[in-house]
Amino acid sequence: MTQPLPPAGQPPDTRWPLAVTTSDRYAPELAQRARQAAAEVGVPYVERTHKQSLASMLADFAHAFIVMEAGAVSLVDDQESLRFSPGLAHLRVKQLDAGVHEDMLLRISGLSEGERVLDCTLGLGADAQVAARLVGPSGALTGLEKSPALYLLARYGLETLPRHPLACPIHVVYADASEYLRTLPNGAFDVVLFDPMFGRPRKSSAAFQALRRHADYAPLTQEMVAEAQRVARRAVVIKGSRYSNDIKKLGLRTEPARPNATVLWARLPGLAVALPPLTEGGEAPT
């Protein structure tokens, strides 16, 4: 349910956890996009007046804002401003374009053209962008994100990127993966991906720290893994940190890795059942 707004221009009694606004250069199309985004996750839209600072809005209205800009989307709180960008995914896709097939997601998942992928922990969509390139225009990729802030950042941020001619679109869904998986039929996707926000005690970039502040920390459970294996026709791929015991708590055997690797991977078999044809628009069945 959308959080109620106070009278126009009047701050709420208690700051909201999250709200949506625009850049200070008002444009009707930006305002409409911001209203739509706010409604999708049930948070307030706050109209921004000319030259009104985000610092004052953070002090008065919300602990964090999704800010719609012309050609960009940002997540801003009182510590950092995180603007959506393709990040390292751009370089990984360029390597694939150049014929370099050393990407770990490709090596572990074996993704190929025409396959359907469910990314249960979309985050900022780095692996999803690579997977979309691997399965190509004839494939399909659905990304789930439970955090409202990260969902909006990825959902509208991905729209600002030019579509790669050899990649499928990324269909972003605001959903809890554990609930979403239970709604799917057996073998609905070829591959299911997980990269949960495990505890990572080592230092990281300011952008990643901003991501961590707004991420969902629900643990990956054995029940979720079992559901993913039911939904996956071919494989379930799980990515985790070497500096966390969470992946070991699931009883999973990790794939061989370099001694200095900071990321570990685990791969489990799926059901190996036949898939129904793609629906119009290239989306997997629900």
Image: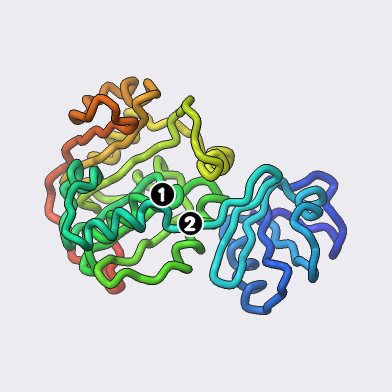
62 displayed left or right of 284? right
In the image shown, does 275 or 247 lie closer to the viewer? 247
Residue beneath the point at 75% across and 66% down = 47
Give me the residue at 25% from left, 45% from top: 105
x, y percent for residue 54: 74, 56
Which quarter of the picture shows residue 129? Answer: bottom left
Residue 24 lies, with reference to residue 85, above or below; the image says below
How far apart marks 2 and 1 lie (CA) works out to 8 Å
Please, what is the three-letter code of the amino acid marked with disc 1?
Leu
The vertical placement of 125 against 97, above or below, is above
Q: Residue at x 58, y 55 (%)?
A: 41
Q: Which residue is mark 2?
A: 154
The answer to whether the residues at label 2 and label 1 have Cβ atoms under 8 Å apart is yes
Q: Picture coordinates of residue 67 (x, y %)?
A: 64, 61
Q: Residues within 10 Å of mark 1 (few under 14, many from 20)?
A: many
Residue type at mark 2? Answer: Ala
Q: Which residue in the structure is indicated by mark 1? A: 122
Which residue occupies the extreme bottom position in the image? 28
Q: Is residue 277 visible?
A: yes
Q: Regarding mark 1 in the picture, which secondary structure is present there?
A: loop
Q: Tag 2: Cα neighbours inside 10 Å, few (<14), some, or many (≥20)?
A: many
